[in-house]
Amino acid sequence: MTPPLPLDEAQRRLLDQVRRLPAERVAVEAALGRYLAEDLAAARTQPPAGLSAMDGYAMREDDLAGPWRVVGESAAGHPFAGTLGDGEAVRISTGALMPAGAGAVLLQENAARDGDRLALNGEGDPTPRHIRRAGFDFRTGDPLLTAGSRIGPAQIALALAGGHAQVLAHRLPNVAIIDSGDELAADPSQCAAHQIPASNGAMIAALAAPHAGAVQRIGPVPDRLDALLDALTAADNADVIVTSGGASVGDHDLVRPALEKWGATIDFWRVAMKPGKPLLIAHRGEQWIVGLPGNPVSSYVTAFLFLLPLLRKLGGAASPLPETIPLVLASELPATGARLELVRAIRTGGRVVAVDEQDSSAMRALAASNALIRRDIHLPAAGPGETVEAYLLGNGGIA
């Protein structure tokens, strides 16, 4: 049996082999969660002309003392048609086109108006600072987004503002999740003493969903070779198959022999990390298989560090691996051994405290955690005030 791989080496070994899924042109509003397959440049200038950034009055830049005569209005979508002369002003709204000849804006709260007569009220003067100049955001040809960028709500707005109705984006992977184990009960309200609810599949499906085109659930599947082979066959069309449980070395851990009988090649098995040592990565052609441990915390942590990067890489992400950030430790941590440790923790502001229960079956502690402290091998004990590296999970462990 070969020694477990170090975490970073195992991640590199997986991702170096993964090829991104094909790209297709899709409507911008249908591209949420996808990754761009090409750089995106502006097809128009934003704003296309000078706009007012505030409600008030527009006047010439060389005519700032007043008084002025109000000769019309410029509203968003309804510009003033004329050209401003000396002693003239136009009522203007936020986002409205600056009239021809105008070069300054007097804020509404700084104006004293009586009919068509406009004067300063002594609180402020007209200024060009309240004008959004043509192209201040971007101009035609300017880079907007790079290949490998994930398309979120702000990126959708930017692409549309840049004049694009469609973008070229990679297809997101389809995922099938197989829950295996004789002890699993499909109905959490109907569990005998020898059973536990089948919760891992739902957890992994929730983790994978934002990074997947579709997620299929299969199981619970009993600990029988034929049942696992049937489940693998049912998942045959998925880009990624995830198994939960059965990846260790017990008499009933049949995922590895089932995969080999099904025709998959085992890329590596076991990673020097805690929790999550019995992780298995395999492939069959262009199809990837991630064998997660059965303990829920181990399953979650290995999914976070291997499954999600795999899905991101397949989907076209430029940077598929999660990044750590430095945080100040607010609790004691023991020395580490020969395995890298991922410590469930709660981050508040820039400080982080390890949760009390670190057992790999402790789901309540996992649900309370919003960070994973990364502790490399053979580190001395750490105490409050020291800086540690941590992965952020979001509230309630949302990756």
Image (tube, rainbow, N blue to C red):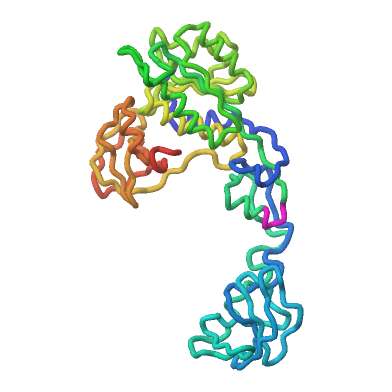
> In this orientation, does residue 195 appear?
yes
Instruction: Name, please, the residue furthest toward the right.
Output: 82
Left or right for 44, reference 194: right
In which quadrant of the rendered image does the C terminus lie? top left
**Looking at the image, which residue is at 46% across and 43% down?**
323
**Looking at the image, which residue is at 73% across and 41% down?**
25
Residue 198 location (% of width, % of height): 42, 20
Residue 106 location (% of width, % of height): 58, 83
What count of labels does the image hold? Answer: 0
Note whether 298 is above or below 235 in the view shown. below
Closer to us: 354 or 86 = 86
Instruction: Name, please, the residue furthest toward the front.
Output: 115
Note whether 245 is above or below 126 in the view shown. above
In which quadrant of the rendered image does the N terminus lie? top left
> In this orientation, does residue 280 appear?
no
Closer to us: 229 or 376 = 229
Residue 366 location (% of width, % of height): 35, 33
Determine the image quadrant of residue 20.
Answer: top right
**Which SS does the magenta portion mostly show?**
loop
Left or right for 188, reference 237: left
Left or right for 233, reference 306: right
Residue 397 location (% of width, % of height): 40, 38
Q: Which residues fall within the magenta stretch?
A: 160-164
Determine the image quadrant of residue 26.
Answer: top right
**Residue 382 colored in magenta in the image:** no
**Looking at the image, which residue is at 46% across and 30% down?**
303
